[in-house]
Amino acid sequence: MNQRLNMLRQLLAAIVVVAAIVGFSSCEKYSWMPEKINPTDSVHFQAEIQPIFSANCSSCHGAIKAPDLRDGHSYKALTEGGYVNLPGETSELYTKMIGTDHSPRSSDVDKQKVLIWINQGAHNN
């Protein structure tokens, strides 16, 4: 009886091991690719860029901490403060957004939009 119980335990352990191997080997790795923004599409400051600042930045960058990214103040603060320049990849605004201090605050899509906006001339549109 004891021998039968041991054999049953071994069979059960083997079934569990096989099921685990089959289960783990059938898992697929899903790769998530961030949305890509078409760099030839116009990016509008008021409709697309300011909402990024309002949602992610203006709580810290209000009237006290430069640049002032509150609605109605941000465009002037960025352009006259020297935060946007070409090429956009070297612009202080963009480099701050992708830096370790600011990166979790805005999404990859938001960063792409800001970069494209700068490279399109950083217009107040």
Image: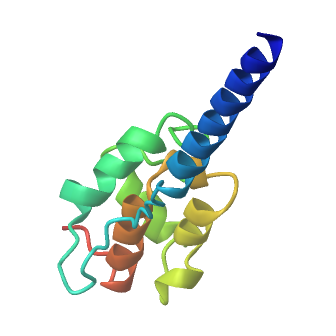
> Can residue 66 be seen?
no
* Furthest residue toward front: 1
**Above/below status of 2 relative to 30:** above
Q: Whole-percent x and y of residue 32?
A: 41, 62
**Above/below status of 103 relative to 80:** above
Q: Between residues 24 and 18, which one lies in front from this camera angle?
A: 18
For residue 47, which quarter of the picture? bottom left
Whether residue 22 sits left or right of residue 112 in the image: it is: right
> Can residue 8 be seen?
yes
- Give the total of numbered labels: 0
Residue at 42 percent across and 75 percent down: it is: 115
Q: Whole-percent x and y of residue 13?
A: 69, 31
| Quadrant location, the N terminus | top right
Q: Whole-percent x and y of residue 110?
A: 38, 59
Q: Between residues 10 and 26, which one lies in front from this camera angle?
A: 10
| Quadrant location, the C terminus | bottom left
For residue 114, which quarter of the picture? bottom left
Residue at 45 percent across and 59 percent down: it is: 28
Whether residue 39 sits left or right of residue 31 in the image: it is: left
Q: Whole-percent x and y of residue 104?
A: 57, 48
Residue at 44 percent across and 54 percent down: it is: 107
Q: How is the image coloured?
A: rainbow
Residue at 60 percent across and 36 percent down: it is: 15
Whether residue 47 sits left or right of residue 119 in the image: it is: left
Q: Between residues 108 and 102, which one lies in front from this camera angle?
A: 108
**Above/below status of 24 relative to 4:** below
Whether residue 44 sits left or right of residue 14 in the image: it is: left
